[in-house]
Image (cartoon, grey):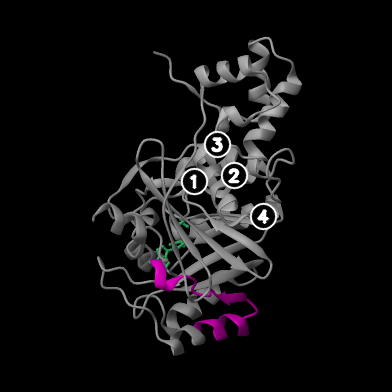
Amino acid sequence: MDEKIDIKSLTLGELEELLGGWGEKSFRAKQIYEWLHVKQVTSFTEMTNISAKLREKLNEECVLVVLEQELVQISKQDGTRKYLFALPDGNMIESVLMRYKHGNSVCVSSQVGCRMGCQFCASTLDGLVRNLSVSELLEQIYRIGADIGERISNVVVMGSGEPLDNYENIVRFVRMLSDERGLNISQRNITVSTCGIVPKIRELAKERFQITLALSLHASSQEKRLKLMPIAKKYELMEVLDICRMYFEETGRRITFEYSLVGGVNDTDEDVERLCGLLQGMNCHVNLIPVNPIKERDYVQSGQSEILNFKNKLEKNGINVTIRREMGRDIDGACGQLRKRYIER
Ligand code: SAH
């Protein structure tokens, strides 16, 4: 039997082609696209301006991927909501809603699990299960928007998984999310975070998106980076920094470097001085993340004085820096923690 078409993963052009093949006019595709991506219905029956006959055909040929909210944890500290969603095949993923003064931001997962093996990260402990489809990426935002009844204005691809290891779907996701006929989220309000897969960053630069690229650096020497991130074996620190410079030149978008501070591992004076040297003259932003300890590893957070020392030294060297506000610490905020705890019950 032929697989059904995942209709929510189709661009408007593809939807027009599909419906054209069924002898339908192209405005029908636009109507259906609006039901899917603006009104975000969860069944074909709700598409009331579509004939019963066409709805039946849609139902026969296509699947409508809808995520099921398995549970939600709401932080008493800051209103952050952590969602556990069940995918159509029963796999579980996490997504997070963060409420800021400037709007609602959703952190989406890009894969079920992850195969990158970063030492301090909970998402990678059991390896990669599979990539998320475009519809599953979009649905995380649609369901959260529906749950809170408010507009989502910002999206960060910083949940579980490595987005550039699911490259094709992430590129389509960015296109459809910023499409004015869909949710119409400005590309400038979309951030994609990567551990540094150099050839994919090169490809992404060619897309000429106006998104922000966040690069997980976490160390200022190849040797130390390799201890924290196995991917450094394949793509060395200097190569990663070179491609970041190229990305900025091609897109005009400054890079955000993420640096998770791990007590006694990458937070010394020497580390920050080397980092200042590496980033000198680059148009970039550094986001310091006090590591969120996971029980499977014995890493600890840096002390307050180390964190401030890091920030001050970077500032003194003219490098833009912020310390990430820890949100939802009381609700398994770290990537992959909630899912892991849930599936191991
Ligand atoms: N695969 C992407 C997205 C990962 S999550 C990437 O590597 O960038 C986003 C950021 O959180 C990454 O910088 C990641 O290294 C970091 N991170 C993961 N687990 C963490 C933890 N327990 N404490 C602090 N930062 C963590």
Q: CA distance from mark 3 to mark 1?
A: 29 Å
Q: Earlier in the sequence, mark 3 or mark 1?
A: 3
Q: Amino acid at mark 2?
A: Leu
Q: Amino acid at mark 3?
A: Thr
Indicate which disc residue 204 carries.
2
Q: Earlier in the sequence, mark 2 or mark 4?
A: 4
Residue 321 falls within the magenta-colored stretch: yes
Where does the magenta region start and end? Answer: 310-332
Where is residue 215 drawn, in percent x and y?
Answer: 52, 59
Q: CA distance from mark 2 to mark 4?
A: 27 Å
Q: Amino acid at mark 1?
A: Leu
Q: CA distance from mark 1 to mark 2?
A: 9 Å
Q: For the residue with label 1, is its CB less than 8 Å from the closest atom of ligand 1?
A: yes
Depth check, mark 3 against mark 1: the one in front is: 3
Residue at 54% x, 65% y: name it.
257
Q: For the residue with label 3, is its CB less than 8 Å from the closest atom of ligand 1?
A: no
Q: What residue is pinned by disc 1? A: 164
Q: CA distance from mark 4 to mark 3?
A: 18 Å
